[in-house]
């Protein structure tokens, strides 16, 4: 059975529980079955550990709305960052504790990444040089072992790795760099509570707006998908002087999280591939387009009767 969700906007909620409640109300009124919480918008985990009183306050707000919840880890969490990996693993463990307290059964995280070039600040040069000497296969194997250990320790939680947007640059080390490596990673983890979050918008950008490549990748990955993220964009990524959201919207550049039909993503074709999918399709529409939540949810629901 398909369920349809919408993500909160962590930089808008920014720890304000009244804003969290407002988002949940909007999602419910728009017809959503689910909501994806984003950890760094809640202030439940601070310094890698749970603040108990804060957790209680957040859960109280969540229980005011009859929705299923999933949890997105912080966008910057990166299991290929060896300098911070221990802290990130502690955040994962605290998130599992929060998920259990809140009745959340699915945790989503971005695949790790590293660069082998020098696109860092001068103060990070030494770190970059050290990273370039490490074998990419060893790094990814370490990431796999870490997430496998977490998943084994929490069989009641479905862990979903998202195909985050890193592009096809040879300077980028990530399991998400191509479909074959994602499939191999999922097979190596080999646990029933580990799946893929397929972000359709990310894949469209990764494939430079090529419909055929997007659909081919999605079809190959279908057996491993446990969660879907859906939003529109124009299929183009551009480096630019002004990278703020408004400028990108006008230009149509990058991961701009548009309502369905505002960009060029072939969402009808992608939804058609999900005829046998039973899970959550989570919309990630920007908060500035909140008046369009309902129509996007209706479009998705219409595909599944």
Image: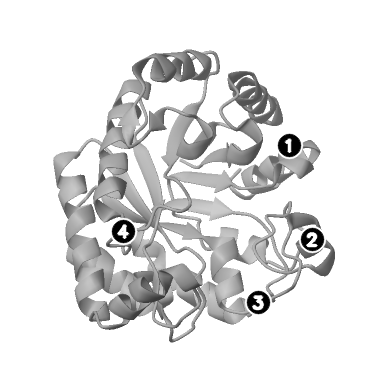
Q: Which mark is residue 79?
A: 4
C-alpha gap between disc 2 and disc 4: 30 Å
| Viewer-side residue, 298 vs 101 | 101
- Residue 172 percent across, percent down from the top left: 42, 78
C-alpha gap between disc 1 and disc 3: 26 Å
**Visible residue check, residue 190:** no
Q: Earlier in the sequence, mark 4 or mark 1?
A: 4
- Residue at numbered disc 2: 249
**Visible residue check, residue 236:** yes
Question: Under tag 1, what secondary structure?
Answer: helix
C-alpha gap between disc 4 and disc 3: 28 Å
- Residue 173 percent across, percent down from the top left: 37, 76
- Residue 4 percent across, percent down from the top left: 56, 40
Q: Which mark is residue 294?
A: 1
The image shows residue 56, relative to residue 6, as above or below, that is above
For residue 63, side relative to residue 49 (left or right): right
- Residue at numbered disc 3: 209
C-alpha gap between disc 2 and disc 3: 16 Å
Q: Nearer the viewer, mark 4 or mark 3?
A: 4
Quarter where residue 100 is shown: top left
Q: Nearer the viewer, mark 1 or mark 3?
A: 3
**Residue drawn 27% across the image and 62% down it:** 82
The image shows residue 256, relative to residue 51, as above or below, that is below
Q: Earlier in the sequence, mark 2 or mark 3?
A: 3
- Residue 176 percent across, percent down from the top left: 40, 70
Crowding near the residue tagged with mark 4, few <14, some 14–19, many ≥20 C-alpha atoms within 10 Å: many
Question: Under tag 3, what secondary structure?
Answer: loop
**Residue drawn 17% across the image and 60% down it:** 145
Question: Under tag 2, what secondary structure?
Answer: helix
C-alpha gap between disc 4 and disc 1: 35 Å
| Viewer-side residue, 78 vs 37 | 78
């Amino acid at each position: 059975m398909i369920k349809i969700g919408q993500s909160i906007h962590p930089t808008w909620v920014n720890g304000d529980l009244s804003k969290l409640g407002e988002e949940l109300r909007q999602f419910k009124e728009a017809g959503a079955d689910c909501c994806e919480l984003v950890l760094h918008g809640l202030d439940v985990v601070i310094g890698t550990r749970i603040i108990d009183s804060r957790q209680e306050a957040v859960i109280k707000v969540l229980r005011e709305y009859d929705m299923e919840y999933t949890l997105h880890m912080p966008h910057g969490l990166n299991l290929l960052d060896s300098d911070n990996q221990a802290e990130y693993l502690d955040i994962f463990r605290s998130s599992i504790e929060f998920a259990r307290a809140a009745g959340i059964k699915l945790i989503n995280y971005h695949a790790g990444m590293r660069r082998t070039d020098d696109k860092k600040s001068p103060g990070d040069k030494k770190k970059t040089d050290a990273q370039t000497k490490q074998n990419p296969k060893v790094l990814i194997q370490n990431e796999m072992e870490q997430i496998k250990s977490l998943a084994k320790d929490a069989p009641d939680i479905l862990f979903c790795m998202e195909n985050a947007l890193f592009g096809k640059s040879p300077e980028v080390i990530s399991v998400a760099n191509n479909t074959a490596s994602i499939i191999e990673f999922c097979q190596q983890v080999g646990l029933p509570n580990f799946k893929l979050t397929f972000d359709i918008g990310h894949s469209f950008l990764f494939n430079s707006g090529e419909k055929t490549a997007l659909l081919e990748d999605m079809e190959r990955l279908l057996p491993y998908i446990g969660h879907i993220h859906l939003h529109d964009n124009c299929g183009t990524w551009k480096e630019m002087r002004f990278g703020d959201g408004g400028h990108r919207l006008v230009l149509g550049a990058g991961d701009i999280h548009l309502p369905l039909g505002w960009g060029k993503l072939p969402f009808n074709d992608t939804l058609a591939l999900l005829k046998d999918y039973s899970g959550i399709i989570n919309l990630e529409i920007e908060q500035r387009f909140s008046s369009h939540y309902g129509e996007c949810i209706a479009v998705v629901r219409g595909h599944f009767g």
